[in-house]
Amino acid sequence: MGCIMIFSGSEAAAKPRKLLMKGAEAIGEAAIRAGAKAYFCYPITPQTEVAEYLARRMPEVGGVFLQGESELAVANMLFGAAATGARVFTSTSSPGFSLMAEAMSYIAGAELPVVFINVMRCGPGLGGVLAAQSDYWQATRNSGHGDYRCPVLAPSSVQEAAELTLAAFELADRYRNPVIVLADGMIGQMMEPVMLEGLAAGEPVEKPWATQGCGGREPVVVKSLYLDPQVLERMNRRLAEKYAKMQTDEVQVELYNVRERHDLVVVAYGTMARICKTAIDRLGKEGLQVGLVRPITLFPFPVDAVHSAARHSAAGVVTVELSQGQMIDDVNLALGELGRSAFFGRSGGMVPTPDEVTRVFRDLVKRGAA
Amino acid sequence: MTGGEVVFSRPESLRRTPTHYCPGCTHGTAHRLVAEVLDELGIRERTVGVAPVGCAVFAYNYFNCDFLEAAHGRAPAFATGVKRVRPELIVFTYQGDGDLASIGLAEILHAANRGEKFTVVFVNNAIYGMTGGQMAPTTLPGQVTTTCPGGRDVEQVGYPLRVAELLATLRTPGYIARGSLHGPEAIVASKRLVRRAFEHQVAGTCFGLVELLSTCPTNWGLTPMAACQWVVDRMIPYYPLGELKRPESATGQVAS
Ligand SMILES: Cc1ncc(C[n+]2csc(CCOP(=O)(O)OP(=O)(O)O)c2C)c(N)n1
Ligand code: SF4
């Protein structure tokens, strides 16, 4: 199957309402429904609620909950736990994710399925604890060393955070690869109605590589060291094929108000995309056609969706982020010969109001028409 | 068959692989002790080993059981992950002194303090072997290495870390012992310690760590025989042998 596109009009279809949950809790519960057997963590705002939720829930379902001594240790515990073949995960926020970079590289090299939830806060350094999208580069390129990539799923609602958490476990198993759910602090903290009923693990994937004791078979080794350069290059080429397959098969994107022709096309993800939708609805009432391309997978990036929406836009494309401009690199790569994207961004937890974004879009449309 | 009796053979827990360790290196001896214990306790088929970064990174080429290869110093975190998810497996890490006592000190300390029920084989050769003989946290005062060419200066870098003593102070029950691999008697005694540590894991009693004083003739610049003598003359006086802590002496006091 190719790219998954969600088409929605200005009046989004009403979702069935069931439970009122915080994003962090919905993520924790979705992981349990995905069959997660172990969760390792180290507290950090704004997602410690995931740990607090699972400290109660994991023992109830016979799973493992362990608070490690650091994110460094936690990520390395995940390697060991995943090597047994169990579904395992962690959640953290930006400074903690940086510490997990070492193990992510080893996990990618050893091809282990592990889910990392990163609820971004703003940096650099300790920065602040408020919502941000300033770790796009870190998540979509490599946080650790080496020639590897991870699928990055970016929810823009609590419901989607739950659904993408489940999807992350499925992808991780299918590709034998770490998968990142990249949320911002708003998604982690806000409460919304969620429907968890339909969420369940898919068919279990065979894991003949898992270290479970060699009784009845030859021993297996889970490792990432290949000192023979020819063997290592072969391994890297095989990994590259895996990442290329993700790029053809796993793209997910939402197209909101995307039509034949636009006054302006917006590219935004996560919380920022929701604010953009409000602005788009308002401008629609003024008779302006503004389309939104919302990447759900940041890697693989929805290159074709961005390019084709941008082809018929009077005022071109604007990328909107809670950062000083990171995803815009991917947008510009996708635009290619169509030119470059304009940019609007706030950071440091300064989430813009719909009014502010509406003004920015209106100005861009005016300038484009001039 | 003639009536000959086999009195010595390769343990089933070791593979038939030519060694990559230097002549006179006692890493191979440490491997053999662990393998004999896995055989004797009948646990090979449910054992998962964790290899370090160091000269023993290829431990999985020798051990005939499932293995993980850890990041430098993180073997105790890897082992924690395995053992927590699959408590019925027997899990051991095999780590050098740079790996365990320097970059991985937080991981070993917290694993021991949580009382993780796996076994650690800690090979202390007072130097970084694999990277070519740099100073380790365990390098002895005055000992010359490539990064302390004038000998370890305790005024600048402090005294060598006694890991077994450090871990023996923890209140959490554990089995902590130190043996040596410099000669036949010491090796036989060390085997008893390794076996006891694994027995504690099989019984589900406690965390276990056995430190083994080991030679690195290549980077010490000594012949294999002189290296064994150096263990006796220099290492044992600073790193005394014996059981430092047993699970029943859970007071944090060092057992004598
Ligand atoms: C993060 C990281 N830093 C440094 C290294 C380089 N390195 C490889 S082995 C080693 C030291 C190993 O010494 P030790 O643990 O004493 O084991 P030995 O080789 O003496 O058995 C170092 C520093 C590495 N592989 N990874
Ligand atoms: S360098 Fe030292 S520790 Fe490494 S194999 Fe040679 S003698 Fe053994």
Image (cartoon, coloured by chain):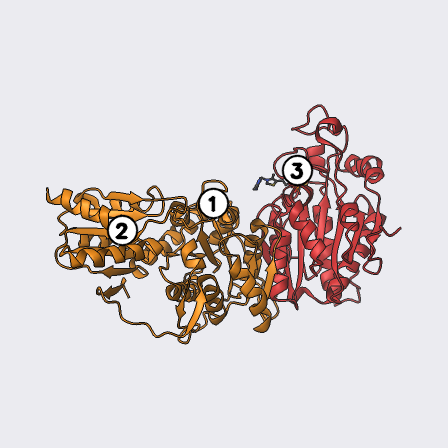
Chain colours: A orange, B red
Q: Nearer the viewer, mark 3 or mark 1?
A: 1
**What chain letter is assigned to the residue under label 3?**
B
- For this orientation, the residue located farthest to the front is A355
Residue position marked by numbered label 2 in the rendering: A355
Per the model, the C-alpha gap separating discs 3 and 1 is 40 Å
Q: Amino acid at mark 3?
A: Tyr
Using the rendered view, name the quadrant where residue A252 is placed: bottom left
User: Under 8 Å from ligand 1: the CB of mark 3?
Assistant: yes
**What chain letter is assigned to the residue under label 2?**
A
- Disc number for residue A128: 1
B17 sits to left or right of B250: left
Residue position marked by numbered label 3 in the rendering: B128
Point out the tag, 2 or 1, that comes first from the N-terminus.
Answer: 1
Quadrant in which ligand 2 is drawn:
top right
Per the model, the C-alpha gap separating discs 3 and 2 is 61 Å
Q: Where is residue A157 drawn, in percent x and y? A: 37, 62
Answer yes or no: do the residues labelled 3 and 2 have beta carbons within 8 Å? no
Q: Amino acid at mark 1?
A: Gly
